[in-house]
Image (cartoon, rainbow, N blue to C red):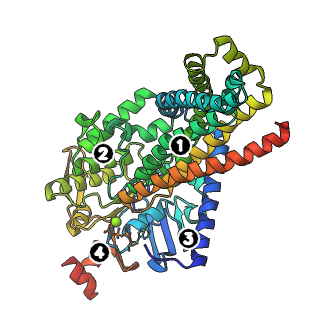
Amino acid sequence: MIGETSTNGHHPSPEVVIEFRDVELGFDQHLVLREVSFRLFRGETKVLFGVAGSGKSVLLKLAMGLLKPDSGTIMVLGQEVSSMPEAELFELRRNIGMVFQESALFDSLTVEENVAFRLIEEHTPPDETRHRVEEALSFVELQHTMQKFPSQLSGGMRRRVAIARAIVSHPEVILYDSPTGGLDPITSTTIVELLVKQRDVYQTSALMVTHRLQDGFIMATHRYNQEKQQMEPVDHGVNTNTSFLILRDGKVIFDGSAHELRGSTDEYIKEYIS
Amino acid sequence: MPILSPDELAKEKVAAVQEYSLLAGHSVANIFRQPRYLGDLLIQADLIGVGSLPIVTLTGLSIGAVLALQTSSTLQQFGSVSLTGQLVSFSMIKEIGPVLTSLMVAGRAATGMASELGSMKVTEQIDAMRALGTDPMKKLVTPRLFATVIMLFFLTIIADFMGLLGGYIVAITLLGLTTQQYWTSAYQQLQFADVFQGLSKPFFFGFIIATVGCYYGFSTKGGTQGVGRSTTQAMVASSVLILIFDFFITRLLIGVFGR
Ligand SMILES: Nc1ncnc2c1ncn2[C@@H]1O[C@H](COP(=O)(O)OP(=O)(O)OP(=O)(O)O)[C@@H](O)[C@H]1O
Ligand SMILES: [Mg+2]
């Protein structure tokens, strides 16, 4: 399967963890994604922008194999998810975490059971499960909500529980769908800091959908300092392990680094990032 | 909702039947596959079985009592009121017990499954479960199927017994029969074929209830309203299917056993 060494974006030919090749998908004669092609490398975080309805959530669901493309191929961790039968996908999905746009927590389970869900399914011993659930919940600073039900939490807390649920098994790839959507700037920054921490401490690869440009730029210009336990700006400009992708009407109109994004001459992109 | 042309509508119906068959097939196949969700099975068994006990007891008792009243008034014309027990036990065990119990359980369980799974569907919890590497068919459908079939079997036995008891109460209080008369006639004429017919039905009906309930849950679209729609459809479809299949199963078994 996948090599053990983390190339972290510095290796001459870094390993591709997600690749879309000419992916197309339509719903009821309406094309949502057209000729979408891109690559995500190991250790890299790709920030996905696009106006509402441009197909960002659909793209993440395709990567997870929750939807099937009409045409094109999707490779994830070296396996072709676009043609894989559902029964085989379950195994692959255990290496991928996903945070849904609306959190999608199991509302009849407690926070603890939600976060532990995957570990219980994998028959992890109870002691280890408890330990890892506590670890994941303290990562998002929600240890005290273990026994609560999702309906008793605020939207931002639910989002953080969803992040804890996605990271608890330390997946190689994480797909975040609008982790900061509809939240205040302070909570948003807390969440972005969590993602930076996840990226820099565990070297996970990620696709991150967001509406907030500044989230993307914080991702690109900060790193996590483990000694000080906080996020800090990188010394010279930008992080090489953060890239950007912009979708417009289901087409990729930009795919590149923060530098390239700032230097873009495309009118639409200039307007978008201004 | 857009109005569909007849061939589009036909296509949609065929696709629905196909999807339903797939779900039904998978849910059975999963009984023999790992992982098995014993905990979920017990929870569902408790919910369906123990939860339906009061209503099944009550309907069994009252329908048995009514049966005794109705048949005795017919039997009176022939001067054979003493056969009341036999008629009650025949109709209860072969027909009314299994069908009525199934309809009652369909009202509780098929709708419950459709609304629970439907809400999970529209809030993306089903997708979240798939994303976490768990097969919703195994985790959600198979335990419900298994629990419904097993519980319906026992509930039917209880309903049959309660029906006989209801008939008995009427027989001794209103019809002037003795305990001995009622019970002997109730069970003297009963043969293996009758009991087999009555107790094989819950297996089919339980299967219908669980698969239809889960199918409508999984195919829910369009928010809260969609959940409501699925729930109603699950109730109607499972009841209608139970009644239709009852006819065919009865016909088949009468053909096999000759009674
Ligand atoms: N299950 C579905 N059935 C039909 N159409 C769908 C479905 N899911 C998405 N769409 C359509 O696909 C398009 C893209 O949807 P998507 O959810 O990916 O948008 P998005 O970029 O995530 O938007 P937002 O920023 O608001 O979350 C929309 O036009 C939507 O109507
Ligand atoms: Mg979206």
Task: Determine the secondary structure under disc 4.
Answer: loop
Q: Mark 3 lies on which chain?
A: A
Q: What residue type is labelled 1?
A: Ala
Could you tell me the amino acid type at mark 4? Val
Q: Which amino acid does label 3 sit on?
A: Thr
Disc 4 and disc 3: Cα gap in Å? Answer: 25 Å
Q: In which quarter of the image is residue B209?
A: top right
Who's the residue at 63% across and 42% down the image?
A: B205
On screen, B131 above or below A44? Answer: above
Image quadrant holding the N terminus of chain B, namely: bottom left
Which SS class for mark 3? strand
Q: Can residue B128 be seen in this view?
A: no
Residue drawn at (81%, 36%) of the image: B259
Disc number placed over residue A161 in the picture, else none: 2
Other-residue count near label 3 (Cα within 10 Å), few / some / many at <14 / 14–19 / ≥20: many
Q: Which of marks 4 and 3 is in front?
A: 4
Residue type, label 2: Val
Which of discs 3 and 1 lies nearer the camera? The answer is 1
